[in-house]
């Protein structure tokens, strides 16, 4: 089955064609970073206007790169949520219109579930039944969560962030360090050769046995990054000159180490509780080299198979949307999907 996928939940305008859920025939992503950079973050109004302008060309490019015409497409899928509501509407409405015009089935896809599927895209990735159930670390700009994937469409939420997401922490830290936007890759580049032990930043909340998690989740599997950002702010206030190249490199390395340590610590605890066959990591922050190294090391020590999303499928893309849709049941053509929940179907 060939699926055309569309992703416009934030500031990437993306379309892709994927066969049988895993074979990526095209994966076209236009990052709007340049348009948002002057503002130091994503401006929703600019994002949705750019989606309107760019999407027709991106969809055309996805079909052309795949070498397929509309007659070879069996279904259309688009991200329905969560994300920026105005941006989501552009991609989803386009998908609806195309499906209607071509008489194709339409599938509304949850963005987080699509990220989880990114670990199964491409020839090097396993088939789900080889590794499920598996533990997934989802680390993006908007979400940080530990999820146990039992099957496609069946997930258990083990832990999540109480405040900022890991990517958000990196983006905010980079802003304080005047490293530009987006912060994750900027901190990674600035940290190269720096001393990660220069400043010992907090590794998330130190939980007491009676401290609270979120939504009834155990605190030991939850994340907290807002204190880290504040610690950096106070450090910079107390140390004029810290933004000179030498100390800034060490600060970037120390900050990155704190984020990665906090993630790895919770993953280890989750593996203690659920010694699954495989450990996956998906989302924009999964591109981070230090995090990938630490996960490789951890998986080696625990003897679990590691599923790292290929870097191209780490940040937002439509291949993960088209791929997941290719493995999920399709509603009847013309079905009204307005009620499809924007929440990950967790048990
Ligand atoms: O998954 P994604 O593209 O968008 C969301 O769904 O949020 O993730 C974007 C996030 C941003 O916070 C960005 O700074 C971070 O991923 N990111 C990275 C790297 N590349 C992107 N963080 C750390 N290291 C990277 N190399
Ligand atoms: Zn995302």
Image: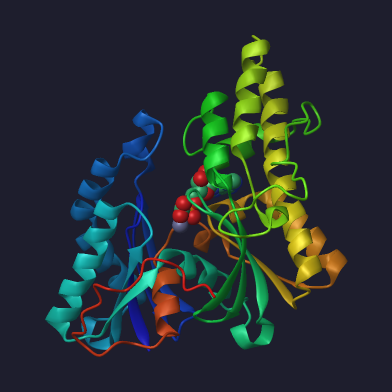
In the orientation shown, which residue stands out farthest toward the front? 210
Residue 200 versus residue 22 in the image, above or below: above
Looking at the picture, how far across and down is residue 264, in whole percent? 74, 53
Looking at the picture, how far across and down is residue 195, in whole percent? 78, 30
Name the side, left or right, on which 83 lies relative to 160.
Answer: left
Number of numbered labels in the structure image:
0
- Quadrant that contains the C terminus: bottom right
Name the side, left or right, on which 102 lies relative to 117.
Answer: left
Residue sitting at x 78%, y 69% = 273
Residue sitting at x 52%, y 42% = 168
Residue sitting at x 46%, y 69% = 344
Looking at the picture, how far across and down is residue 250, in whole percent? 73, 27
Q: Quadrant of residue 229?
A: top right
Residue 122 versus residue 301 in the image, above or below: below
Residue 189 in view, yes or no: yes
Q: Give the color scheme: rainbow, by chain, secondary structure or one colour.
A: rainbow
Q: Quadrant of residue 274?
A: bottom right
Residue 139 in view, yes or no: no
- Quadrant that contains the N terminus: bottom left
Residue 293 versus residue 129 in the image, above or below: above
Residue 92 versus residue 200 in the image, above or below: below
Q: Quadrant of residue 217?
A: bottom right
In the orientation shown, which residue stands out farthest toward the left? 101
**Could you say which is closer to the camera, residue 93 or residue 219?**
219
In the orientation shown, which residue stands out farthest toward the top? 240
Looking at the picture, how far across and down is residue 4, in whole percent? 32, 76
Name the side, left or right, on which 128 lies relative to 142.
Answer: right
């Amino acid at each position: 089955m060939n699926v055309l996928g569309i992703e416009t939940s934030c500031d990437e305008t993306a379309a892709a064609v994927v066969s049988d859920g895993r074979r990526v025939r095209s994966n076209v992503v236009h990052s709007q970073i340049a348009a948002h950079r002057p503002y130091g973050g994503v401006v929703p109004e600019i994002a949705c206007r750019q989606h309107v302008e760019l999407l027709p060309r991106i969809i055309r490019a996805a079909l052309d790169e795949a070498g397929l015409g509309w007659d070879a497409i069996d279904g259309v899928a688009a991200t329905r949520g969560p994300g920026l509501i105005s941006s989501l509407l552009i991609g989803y409405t386009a998908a609806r219109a195309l499906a209607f015009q071509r008489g194709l089935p339409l599938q509304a896809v949850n963005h987080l579930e699509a990220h989880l599927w990114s670990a199964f895209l491409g020839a090097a990735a396993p088939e789900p039944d080889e590794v499920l159930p598996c533990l997934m670390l989802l680390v993006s700009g908007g979400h940080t969560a530990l999820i146990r994937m039992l099957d496609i469409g069946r997930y258990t939420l083990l832990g999540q962030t109480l405040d900022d997401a890991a990517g958000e922490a990196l983006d905010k830290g980079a802003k304080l360090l005047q490293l530009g936007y987006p912060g994750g890759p900027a901190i990674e580049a600035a940290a190269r050769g720096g001393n990660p032990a220069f400043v010992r930043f907090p590794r998330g909340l130190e939980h007491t046995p009676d401290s609270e998690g979120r939504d009834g989740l155990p605190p030991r599997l939850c994340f907290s990054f807002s204190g880290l950002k504040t610690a950096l702010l106070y450090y910079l206030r107390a140390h004029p000159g810290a933004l000179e190249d030498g100390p800034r490199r060490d600060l970037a390395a120390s900050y990155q180490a704190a984020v990665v340590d906090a993630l790895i610590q919770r993953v280890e605890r989750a593996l203690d509780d659920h010694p699954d066959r495989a450990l996956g990591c998906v989302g924009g922050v999964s591109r981070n080299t230090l995090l990938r190294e630490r996960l490789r090391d951890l998986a080696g020590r625990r003897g679990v198979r590691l599923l790292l999303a290929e870097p191209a499928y780490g940040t937002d893309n439509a291949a993960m949307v088209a791929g997941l849709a290719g493995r999920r049941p399709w509603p009847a053509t013309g079905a009204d999907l307005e009620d499809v929940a924007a929440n990950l179907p967790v048990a």
